[in-house]
Image (spheres, rainbow, N blue to C red):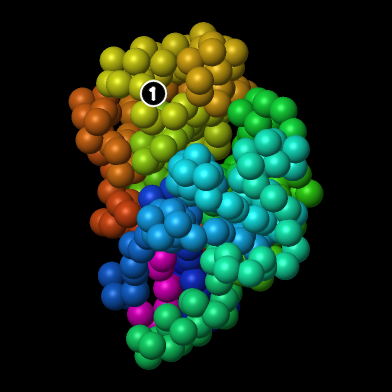
Amino acid sequence: MNEAIYAYLEKIGPVFCLDIGSGTQDALLALPGVNFDNWPRFVLPSPARRIRSRIEKATQAKTALWLYGGNMGGGFSQALVTHLAAGLPCYATQEAAKAICDDPQKVQKMGITFAEHCPMAALPLHLTDFSPEFWQTFWLSLDLPLPALTVASAQDHGFCLTGNRTFRMQIWADLLARHASLPDWIYHEVPQALTRLGALQAASGGPVADTGTSALLAFLCDSGILKRSFDTGITLVNAGNTHTLAALIFQGKVCGLYEQHTGLIDKAKLAQDLKDFRLGWLPCEQVQKAMGHGTVYGKRPEEAGGFEPTYFTGPQRERFAGLGQFANPLGDMMVAGCFGLLYGLSLAASTPTNLTE
């Protein structure tokens, strides 16, 4: 484990790292004075998955729903569509409706009625990616110390009434234009357009980042991978349950990003996309025509070469076996994003803009 992380913990105190995906939320409580192998870690159902389960049960019971709270991951949307298709009512506050769609008119066209108070006989469901009460009870029930800081990540396409895939790639492009160093991609102040991350920060009270950022930082926790990036350009691929993100990295800095839906690509398709991406021949529009998010490119130093060394992590990495080497940052792939968040914070605190070998 990087000494900067231990020094950071001694200064800050216990840090709760939470990486929220579509299927799971992966939690790590980093404790000062304790070897990282003994830090408590958990893989739990994602908040959206829990909401989906409650909606499905309400549909079976033929119960009306009232959604309140705020913006969060929308992985429960298909269950909501099924609920409405069954002729069952659903109500939502204006704020909670943002978890379904940025456009309130589209929300109403789905058959959802806006209501700021719970209608009689409707089941109230609180929408949030982060519940302070849940986590406080969780830590206390395990006789663990309460964290001094919480850092969390979630995917945010940004507030956009049209073309959120294009808008998400613009967010990546803006980050890449301002900073190529990944620790600078952790937000201490969330841009107004990132409404999901803004809601997450308001609930958690700490820094936040996109799940793509936490995954890429996780790779660089591995000193061997980081060192390789100083010798030549490398390709990092996080094969998530719903999204696959690839990055071109040289000397610890981002030179390009590719993002596609995992379920829409097989091994052969990803191999071709990565080949073209490394060469800079894969335009954003081509990926979007294939229903993906797209590509963005930054500076590409000649000494980076062709970015051929490739490393994979993520819960769907087995689908792409043979396209690169499997990485297991700090020996625990499922909480790798949590390690990445902590690593990024410690680097930002010690060396504000640069990753070093």
Q: Which residue is mark 1?
A: 264
Q: What residue is shown at x 41% (from left), y 65% (from top)?
A: 27
Whole-percent x, y for residue 171 in the image = 68, 35
The correct choice, above or below, for 144 with respect to 154 in the image is: below
Q: What residue is shown at x 69% (from left), y 50% (from top)?
A: 113
The correct choice, above or below, for 42 with respect to 195 in the image is: below
When asked about the image quadrant of residue 237, the answer is top left
The kind of residue on which mark 1 rests is: Leu
Q: What residue is shown at x 68% (from left), y 26% (from top)?
A: 163
Secondary element at image label 1: helix
Whole-percent x, y for residue 353 in the image = 64, 49
Whole-percent x, y for residue 89 in the image = 58, 52
The correct choice, above or below, for 290 with respect to 311 in the image is: above
Q: Inspect this view and state whether residue 183 appears.
A: no
- Is 223 on the left or on the right of 163, as rendered? left
Q: Which residues are magenta?
A: 26-34
* Furthest residue toward right: 192
Q: Inspect this view and state whether residue 267 appears.
A: yes
Whole-percent x, y for residue 190 in the image = 72, 54
